[in-house]
Image (cartoon, rainbow, N blue to C red):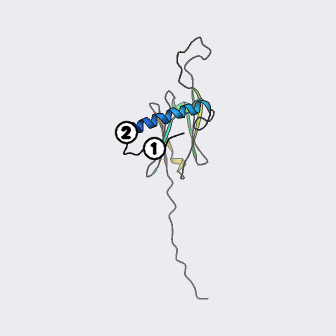
Amino acid sequence: MSLPPLSRAIPRSLANLQDEIGQMLGRMWHTGISTAPLDGQNWAPAIDVYEEATGYVLTAEVPGLKVDDIEVTHEDGELVIRGQKAADFDEEGDREYLKAERRFGSFARRIALPEPIVVSAITATCRAGLLTVHMPKKEPAKRETVTIQVLDD
């Protein structure tokens, strides 16, 4: 659930406030009713997707995950990111938390792409808790004009 963006003419602090309120409402929404991106999961990484002239770029926040914990695939026109974030504590232990906000467990995110991409050229890197996936667009089919001779019958 996101709010419509504010105009760029409004001071940046109001836009930041709108983002914070949107994120807060999103967290409240997901703790009760499960909708995208959580869809019944304990957690899902925050993502950004943007378009460049030659393709799309996805970035996902995956702090604490190693490369072996992440799987990136392309399925039926969608980019799919799956992973597992293991708890770094014994859930059965005697530790009593004063506050516990971190989430653990498996996740899966499916991102539909508006145009066909070159699947064999997708690249992904993970550095400092940020997964970056580059997806080059397919070249559009070139239109060809053929003149057809009209014969006298």
At numbered mark 1, what does the secondary structure look like: helix, strand or loop? Answer: loop
**Magenta span contains residue 89:** yes
61 displayed left or right of 11: right
Residue count near mark 1 (Cα–Cα under 10 Å), binned few <14, some 14–19, many ≥20: few
Q: Which residue is mark 1?
A: 5
The image shows residue 39 at horizontal and vertical percentages of 62, 36
Q: Which mark is on residue 138?
A: none
- Along the viewing direction, whichever of 70 and 56 lies nearer the viewer: 56
Q: Are marks 2 and 1 in contact (CB under 8 Å)?
A: no
Q: Residue at x 51, y 35 (%)?
A: 46
Q: Is residue 140 at all visible to an observer of this figure?
A: yes
Q: Which residues are magenta?
A: 88-95
Q: Residues within 10 Å of mark 2 (few under 14, many from 20)?
A: few
Residue 27 position, x and y percent, is 54, 31
77 w.r.t. 71: above or below: below
Which residue type carries mark 1?
Pro
